[in-house]
Image (tube, rainbow, N blue to C red):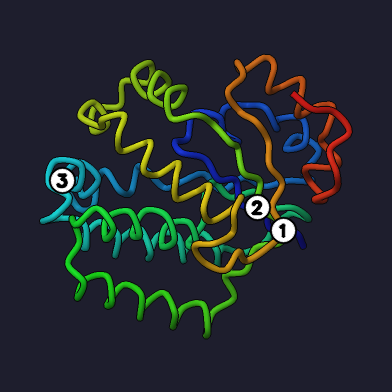
Amino acid sequence: MLLISVENLQDEFHPRRGYIIAAESLTLLSVLTEPVSKWRNVRGHNPLGLMYQDASKWGLTFQTYVQLTMLDQHTKPRISPVRMMERSIHSAKYIFVENLFKSGKMPEVDYVVLSEWFDWIVKNIDVSVDLIVYLQTSPAACYERLKLRCREEEKIIPLEYLEAIHQLYEEWLIKQTLFRVPSPVLVVEADQDMQTMLEFYEQNRDQILTGGELKHHL
């Protein structure tokens, strides 16, 4: 059983956009998309929107729920040989919680409490991943995709936020100086358009799904 975590600044190029449909149709692969719908509606409340409006006030609330929902993703029953997950509990902690703390929008006590929860989960529950596919995308390209997507909560996201997230991803997965990387990392340059990404996936499908060296490059 292989679990692949797909990491990116934002979720424009991810499994549900269709570039792995061929593998899905062969029942080789199940896709676990980021549970954004849950984050936007928790019994009538929108913690995602609240967090973007006032991260200092709602960061802990939102990230606690993110950690819970990502844990649920990791522990879902395995129904196919390969599972591909959009982001993971690891990036939730190492990138997004870390960004809140480093930017001064999360008090140290909140950061420590979330870290204690995360450390307990990692120690006591299997949330391991076998491969991280890092869709390396420039903040500028992600910013343009956010504007095209027009998700209501994201309209107030500045470019500087994406630049900070990008820097953390680079430190974690490329330089590997931020936190322990839980698996091998496959880097895919993802500034390209959807058709180019689809062709790239088809050319490298076996390598992506097994963590091998890419035969073709963008």
Write the residue at 41% across / 62% down.
93
Q: Is residue 73 above or below residue 14?
A: below
First in residue order: circle 2 vs circle 3: 3
User: Cα distance, mark 2 to mark 3?
Assistant: 29 Å
First in residue order: circle 1 vs circle 3: 3
Instruction: Name the amino acid, label 3.
Output: Leu
Tag 2 residue: 132
Instruction: Name the amino acid, label 2.
Output: Ile
Instruction: Name the amino acid, label 1.
Output: Pro
| Residue 184 numbered tag | 1
Q: Are marks 2 and 1 in contact (CB under 8 Å)?
A: yes
What is the x, y in percent for residue 69?
Answer: 40, 60
In this image, 159 relative to 32: left or right?
left
Q: Are marks 2 and 3 in contact (CB under 8 Å)?
A: no
Tag 3 residue: 50
User: Cα distance, mark 1 to mark 3?
Assistant: 35 Å
Task: Mark 1: give few (<14), some (14-19) or many (20+) Cα within 10 Å.
Answer: few
Q: Secondary structure at mark 2?
A: strand
